[in-house]
Image (cartoon, rainbow, N blue to C red):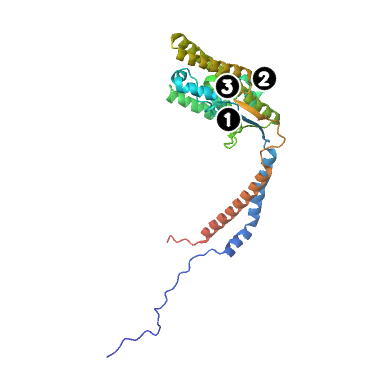
């Protein structure tokens, strides 16, 4: 009986292995050496642009005021005892009997509020300083810029398609060409930095400007104006509280209630007296702002280094991309 021929090989015949395209370091190095001129040129141009920007960018200086909350515990023990006996009436009068709480947070919120900044801008007439490119120093008036064709087209489309559309604040208020209050507030907000150290409770107010003397003056002036604002507001609220307590005192005939009301009025009168004689009402200045001698930006060395690195990366990317396009062009067409 015939047997089938045995396979002389102990293993099945190997199948042809399809070699995939591999990218070696040698190929990458060849691409880089081939495109070294374009890589070097792009890197030099980018670095040169970074150098020009670093040298021409305006220097920004930061003036800082270091301060601490000046809110003391007003009538701590005595007022706390009154709170347990007659806290409801004190609450109706708008009197806080639990000691200080939220005074620093309230003052910081006022410092960074839009209304406080806009009042400060109007009182000091800071718009010409915030927008010097739009202010004609010789004529003492704002430069009215003619609207562009694009802006005119958009406005006409709004009027025709949306006749009842509300006008913007700039169209309502700035007939003289001056920037709006909102634009001025955004500029002030961008140059003002407020930080609080949670461990020590120290508050730092920083103003960043191109003029170091002006930055220091604005920082000190902002804290002084904040103290005056908070002191004036506290005096007004305390006087209203005293007026309310005096009315309640005239209505009641209970001796115990009258004693509590007298104590409340006495404490509030002390608060008014302290507010009138204390200039640093909200914050006590530990270290006032002085004109800085060193700029905080632009950081020229960092800009040049980043420009060099980005230029080198861009040149390498363009080199590989051009090599990829050339390889794609060498592949024979397989449409047929």
Circle 3 SS class: helix
Q: Pick out the residue farthest to the right.
A: 293
Circle 1 SS class: helix
Q: Are marks 3 and 2 in contact (CB under 8 Å)?
A: no
Residue at 35 percent of width and 86 percent of height: 6
Residue at 65 percent of width and 50 percent of height: 43
Specify whether residue 112 is in view: no
- Residue 333 lies, with reference to residue 173, above or below; the image says below
Q: Pick out the residue farthest to the left.
A: 1
Q: Are marks 1 and 3 in contact (CB under 8 Å)?
A: no
**Callout 3: few (<14), some (14-19), or many (20+) C-alpha neighbours within 10 Å?**
many
Specify whether residue 309 is in view: yes
Q: Position of residue 40 (x, y in %)?
A: 66, 53
Q: Position of residue 23 (x, y in %)?
A: 54, 63
In the image, which is nearer the foreground, mark 2 or mark 1?
1
Quadrant where the N terminus sits is: bottom left
Count every numbered label the image shows and give the total.
3
Between residue 87 and residue 130, name the one nearer to us.
87
Mark 1–mark 3 Cα distance, whole angstroms, equals 20 Å
Quadrant where the C terminus sits is: bottom left
**Callout 1: few (<14), some (14-19), or many (20+) C-alpha neighbours within 10 Å?**
some
Side of 139 where 245 appears, left or right: left
**Callout 2: few (<14), some (14-19), or many (20+) C-alpha neighbours within 10 Å?**
few
Task: Give the residue number, with chain letter if any, for mark 2.
Answer: 140
Residue at 52 percent of width and 16 percent of height: 263
Task: Give the residue number, with chain letter if any, for mark 1.
Answer: 189
- Residue 252 lies, with reference to residue 173, above or below; the image says above
Task: Give the residue number, with chain letter if any, for mark 3.
Answer: 230
Between residue 71 and residue 206, name the one nearer to us.
71
In the image, which is nearer the foreground, mark 1 or mark 3?
3
Within the image, what quadrant is residue 302 found in? top right
């Amino acid at each position: 009986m015939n047997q089938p021929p045995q396979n002389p090989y102990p293993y099945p015949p190997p199948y042809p292995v399809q070699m995939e395209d591999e990218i070696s370091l040698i190929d990458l190095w060849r691409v880089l050496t081939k495109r070294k001129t374009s890589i070097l040129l792009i890197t030099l141009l980018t670095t040169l642009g970074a150098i020009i920007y670093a040298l021409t960018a305006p220097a920004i200086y930061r003036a800082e005021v270091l301060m601490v909350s000046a809110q003391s515990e007003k009538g701590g023990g005595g007022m706390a005892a009154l709170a347990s006996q007659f806290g409801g009436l004190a609450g109706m009068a708008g009197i806080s009997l639990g000691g200080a709480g939220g005074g620093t947070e309230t003052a910081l919120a006022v410092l960074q509020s839009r209304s406080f900044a806009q009042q400060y801008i109007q009182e000091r007439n800071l718009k010409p300083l915030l927008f010097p490119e739009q202010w004609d120093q010789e004529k003492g008036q704002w430069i009215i810029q003619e609207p562009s064709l694009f802006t005119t087209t958009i406005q006409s489309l709004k009027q025709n398609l949306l006749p009842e559309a509300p006008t913007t604040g700039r169209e309502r208020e700035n007939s003289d060409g001056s920037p709006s209050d909102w634009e001025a507030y955004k500029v002030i907000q961008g140059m003002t930095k407020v930080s609080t150290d949670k461990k020590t409770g120290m508050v730092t107010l920083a103003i960043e400007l191109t003029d170091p003397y002006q930055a220091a003056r604005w920082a000190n002036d902002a804290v002084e104006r904040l103290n005056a604002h908070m002191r004036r507001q506290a005096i007004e609220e305390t006087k209203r509280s005293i007026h309310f307590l005096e009315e309640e005192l005239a209505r009641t005939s209970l001796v115990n209630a009258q004693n509590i009301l007298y104590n409340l009025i006495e404490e509030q009168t002390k608060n008014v007296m302290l507010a009138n004689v204390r200039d640093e009402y909200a914050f006590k200045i530990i270290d006032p702002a002085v004109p800085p001698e060193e700029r905080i930006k632009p950081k020229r060395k960092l800009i040049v280094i980043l420009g060099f690195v980005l230029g080198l990366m861009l040149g390498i990317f363009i080199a590989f991309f051009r090599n990829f396009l050339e390889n794609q062009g060498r592949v024979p067409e397989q449409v047929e």
